[in-house]
Image (tube, helix red, strand yellow):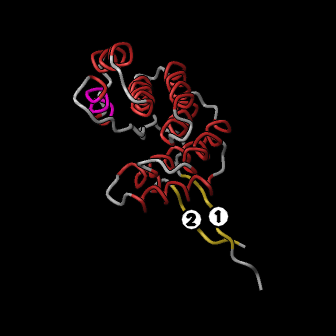
Amino acid sequence: MPRATLVFAAIAALLIPIEARAATTVLGNGLAEVCSNYAKAGDDREEALHVCTVALETEAMRRRDRAGTYVNRGVIRMRRQDYAAARRDFELAVRLQPDLGEAYVNRGGALVGEKRYMEALLEIDKGLALGPEEPEKAYYNRGLANEGLADLKAAYFDYKRAMELKPDWEIPRRELSRFTVRSGN
């Protein structure tokens, strides 16, 4: 009796720009909190970047909040497609707070933007192991990395997991619509 297997095919396997960046919540009433709000809102204006930089240069913060502010500035830099500068911010965040999952997930996202997919997978997996605040974004970015490596089956399951974790998020649903799953021999 022939064994059924799944065959995965992406209809138009092109990578879209990274739309999943995991910002870090920084609480307080200073510029670091404003930076956090900009990053979470998807703001990539020069003003947002400047606020984050001034916060890092002038405000006294706990170690975790400083690391989070580096992540948030890196997120803004990624939106501006300045992947190398974003990676430097994520690396500074990791040095300050090695257990901050968002720093690894976003460093992986920057590597996806640079088409360094294998390195991206390693970083995203580290971030997932640390339990990021928004794991669906990690799975989405990992799906992009797997698709970049032509591992369509893994990409499909990553997009599917992202959608399961956040059912109302349209981006992974759109990615999944490009795939055809059929049984084969």
Amino acid bearing label 2: Val
Amino acid bearing label 1: Val
Instruction: Please name the residue shown 32% across and 24% down the image.
Output: 44
Instruction: Please name the residue shown 59% across and 68% down the image.
Output: 182
Q: Is residue 139 above or below residue 108?
A: below
| Residue 175 lies in the magenta-colored region | no
Q: Is residue 2 above or below residue 89?
A: below
Instruction: Please name the residue shown 37% across and 16% down the image.
Output: 53
Q: Is residue 173 above or below residue 30?
A: below
The part of the image, by quadrant, that contains residue 118 is top right
Q: Quadrant of the N terminus?
A: bottom right
In the displayed structure image, the side of residue 99 where residue 54 appears, left or right: left
Q: Nearer the viewer, residue 149 or 108?
A: 108
Residue located beneath label 2 in the image: 181
Residue located beneath label 1 in the image: 7
The answer to whether the residues at label 1 and label 2 have Cβ atoms under 8 Å apart is yes
**What span is in magenta?**
33-39
| Residue 35 lies in the magenta-colored region | yes
Which x, y percent locates residue 68? 41, 32
